[in-house]
Image: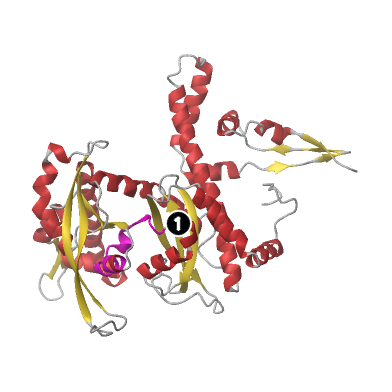
Amino acid sequence: MAFLHPTPYPDPISKDVYHDLFEYLGLNEGIVQNYFLARSKRCHKKDAVAFDSSTVSSYSRYLKETRQGFNKAGDGLDTVKLLTLFDLATHQPIAFAREPGNLADVSGIENALKQFSFLNISKAQIVTDKGYYSQNNIGQMLRKHIKFLTAASTDLSWVNQHLQKNKPGLETASSLCPWDFNIYGITVPVDAEFTYQRQRNRGQALKGDTVSETRRLYLHLYLNRERVGEDEKRLATDLMSLKNDIEKGLWDELSESAQKKAEKYLNTSRLGRGGKLKVTINEDAYARARKDDGYFALVSNKAEDCFEALRKYRLREKIEEAFKDTKNRLDGTRTRVWDGDTLKRRMFCQFVGLGYQCFLHTKIQELKEQLELSLSDSKLAERDKEQNADLLKWLKKQSMQSLIDWFDCIELTRPRNDDLIHTQTSGDTKRDRLFFTLLGISDFEEKTQNQVKVNP
């Protein structure tokens, strides 16, 4: 691939080149830390940062960081935790840390914040997904004085209790979101009680004693009318699929979560001894589930407007795709190294690639906005408007992965003739060249069609 897709590195990038790079970075920790510091200076980290925890599986028995713990891939292998901080305002990754695979979620956040204390992000609000909404995680973040904003399931008893009580407040004009008219939201202050066991002696309190504390939380409740029909359709589709699988005798092949769902929403019976299995939907459970369709919740320990909290969480959702790219396009599903130092440097190289990919994503979004504006520009020639409209239509159909795949098929060759090397590309079109030009790569054609003189 390096022969057909030239890089700034002059020679083909072999395994030995990778090894030398990882080893060099391993001996120069200052390069990594200075890179994190440079990125953090460009971010608005004092407001809020998105936090992502991912697991990387490994077959290796020599990596001390790989341990048995929660494995998102579900492959049963030992894992390393990859903790990544993103700036919500710029959609750019700030820094990453690695932790042993058996480390608890909140301990991972706390350790990462300690490691990155020199980046001055300790005062930032940590925005997480639903993986952190358990009472234990929330309680730990409160005790460790971590400002957080996390999605919470409306199935949680205490969340659902407040939801049912405050549903009328979500039906008023005053609760309408000022920038999304499908959303209604309110904030409910909650004095929540949390219990935990002491980890050390202090005064008359002994290690192991159960302690109860009441802390103030802010429960942001929302109703999205567009999601009502979607939620109903999703639940109906899941239940009918489970019903068909059970009737076919595939109960043992269902996952544990699918079996629990079937037990909650489905009734089974047989007509006579050895008769045909009959599966029906539990109407009461189905009705209880549907009454909360379209509702969702966020929980925080910071007092703020519910729609400001929603804005932050939606910004996090927009960069969710970037979290997945580390594992998919940047080959992060396996460790593929033999020692811990090399693993960290490999992860650092992937992190640098992630930064470039996030930057490209932002530039493409800006390009789409520019193309939209150009279509209403009276000074622009009709021919140029048609080309811009065609490019915009094409870009709207592309995901980041499909866009990169599209240009990945364009290969560069340099056939040699006497003392000249003719640089040629394959597969590029006028639309491709317009795309690169508008991105700011104005010398695209010059680079791909240039003839370079060499020594014989």
Which residue is more in the foreground, 406 or 267? 406
Residue 256: in magenta span:
no
How far from the left and from the top, in percent, is residue 27?
Answer: 66, 67
Where residue 160 appears, x then y in whole percent? 15, 58
Q: Residue at x 69, y 38 (%)?
A: 425
Name the residue at the right extreme: 456
Q: Magenta stretch containing residue 126, yes or no?
A: yes
Q: Which residues are magenta?
A: 122-141
Circle 1 residues within 10 Å: few <14, some 14–19, many ≥20 = some
Q: Secondary structure at mark 1?
A: loop
Instruction: Answer with the quarter of the image where residue 21 lies.
Output: bottom right
Give the quarter of the image for residue 260: bottom left
Residue 185 in the image, given as x and y percentages of width and height: 19, 45
Horizontally, residue 361 falls left or right of residue 273, namely right
Residue 78 lies, with reference to residue 361, above or below; the image says below
Asked whether 39 or 353 is in front, the reply is 39
With respect to residue 445, does 148 lie above or below?
Answer: below
Q: Quadrant of the C terminus?
A: top right
Q: Can you identify the residue that label 1 sits on?
A: 120
The percent position of residue 46, horizontal first and vertical second, equals 40, 51
Q: Nearer the viewer, residue 97 or 364?
A: 97
Q: Amino acid at mark 1?
A: Asn
- Residue at image position (10%, 73%) is 272
In this rendering, does residue 435 appear at all?
yes
